[in-house]
């Protein structure tokens, strides 16, 4: 079997089964495990899968550049944003993550809302300028350009000074075994810190993130209180998360 044929079969198996175990796959094709692992390494370097111990899992499509992500699942993100905005109550301190869905949440907040919104995203802060009674707490730091958010020691210090009622977290991967993941180590650390400072953490989960895994772990699923998905989402991942006692909100659109 040619290398291109093996790689195509690996990606097809990932799409159908949600995982590839190197040892099992090598036996199936009567090839060495080293050959399959080399294929997995090359596919991972191309961003087509995420290597894990013993094999691979689907890579998140949410790792694309910011301009590309702004065009992905626009209607679903809008619906999720409206559902998140409806959860915010008067007088609360809300932490909004970075990313395209978080910006949509900011825009969906009622114009007459009285609340404080903390964020490490300049895009979110700008989206809130037309809300006269929303106090904006912008966390500073070094800008991670892939998501246009502040990271690093300065950001972590600013986060430590705040206590939020609710945190709307964006991630690039949501997996039953590997939890919530993202593509940058410092961004993962910032998200983890915000979650620790918040009474509730709610995940903004467009469907392309479900069952996917990125390189850096943020928190386990049992450390969040809820997940918001689009109304049409019927993923087995969501059904399994619900069985763990985590609240699932299907955004109506």
Image (cartoon, helix red, strand yellow):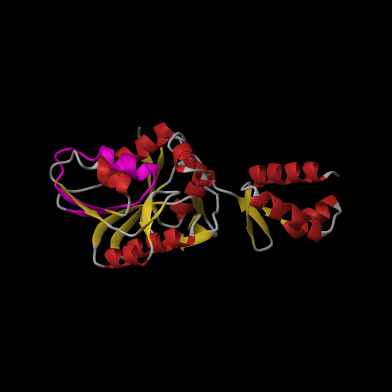
Using the rendered image of the protein, determine whether residue 86 is visible from the camera's viewpoint. no
> What x and y, as percent, mark residue 154?
32, 65
Point out the image quarter for the C terminus: top left
**Quarter holding the N terminus?**
top right
What residue appears at the point 36 percent right and 67 percent down from the top-left corner? 153
The residue drawn where x is 48% and y is 50% is 172
- In-image side of 113 versus 85 (left or right): left
* Image: 43 above or below 22: above
Q: Report the front residue among 232 and 100.
A: 100
Q: Could you say where residue 237 lies in the image, as x and y percent from the top left? A: 51, 49
Residue 151 visible somewhere in the drawing: yes
For the image, the number of numbered tags is 0
* Residue 101 left/right relative to 20: left
Nearer-the-camera pick, 154 or 72: 154
| Residue 114 on the magenta segment | yes
- Left or right: 247, with 239 as reference point: left
Identify the residue at horizontal 53%, vertical 46% (top origin): 236
Quadrant of the rendered structure where residue 113 is?
top left
Name the residue nearer the viewer: 10 or 249: 10
202 over 67 or under it: above or below: below
Is 28 covered by the magenta stretch?
no
Q: Which residues are magenta?
A: 92-118
Determine the image quadrant of residue 130.
Answer: top left
Residue pictured at 72% horizontal, 46% vertical: 10
Q: Position of residue 65 (x, y in %)?
A: 49, 43
Q: Position of residue 171 (x, y in %)?
A: 44, 51
Residue 166 in the figure: left or right of residue 224 = left
């Amino acid at each position: 079997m040619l290398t291109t044929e093996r790689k195509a079969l690996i990606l097809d198996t990932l799409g159908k089964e949600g995982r590839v175990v190197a040892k099992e796959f090598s036996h199936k094709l009567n090839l060495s495990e080293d050959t399959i692992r080399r294929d997995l390494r090359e596919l991972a370097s191309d961003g087509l899968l995420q290597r894990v111990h013993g094999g691979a899992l689907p890579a998140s499509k949410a790792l694309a550049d910011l301009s590309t992500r702004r065009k992905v699942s626009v209607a679903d993100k809008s619906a999720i944003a409206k559902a998140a905005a409806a959860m915010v109550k008067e007088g609360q301190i809300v932490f909004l993550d970075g990313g395209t869905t978080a910006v949509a949440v900011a825009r969906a907040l009622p114009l007459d809302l009285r609340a404080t919104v903390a964020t490490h995203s300049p895009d979110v802060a700008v989206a809130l300028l037309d809300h006269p009674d929303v106090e904006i707490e912008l966390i500073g730091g070094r800008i991670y350009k892939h998501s246009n958010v502040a990271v690093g020691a300065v950001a972590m210090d600013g986060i430590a000074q705040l206590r939020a009622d609710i945190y709307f977290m964006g991630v690039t991967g949501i997996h039953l075994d590997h939890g919530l993941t993202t593509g940058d180590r410092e961004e993962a650390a910032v998200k983890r810190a915000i979650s620790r400072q918040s009474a509730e953490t709610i995940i903004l989960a467009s469907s392309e993130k479900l069952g996917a895994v990125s390189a850096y772990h943020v928190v386990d699923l049992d450390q969040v209180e809820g997940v918001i998905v689009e109304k049409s989402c019927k993923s087995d991942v969501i059904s399994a998360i619900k069985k763990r006692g985590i609240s699932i909100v299907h955004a109506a659109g």
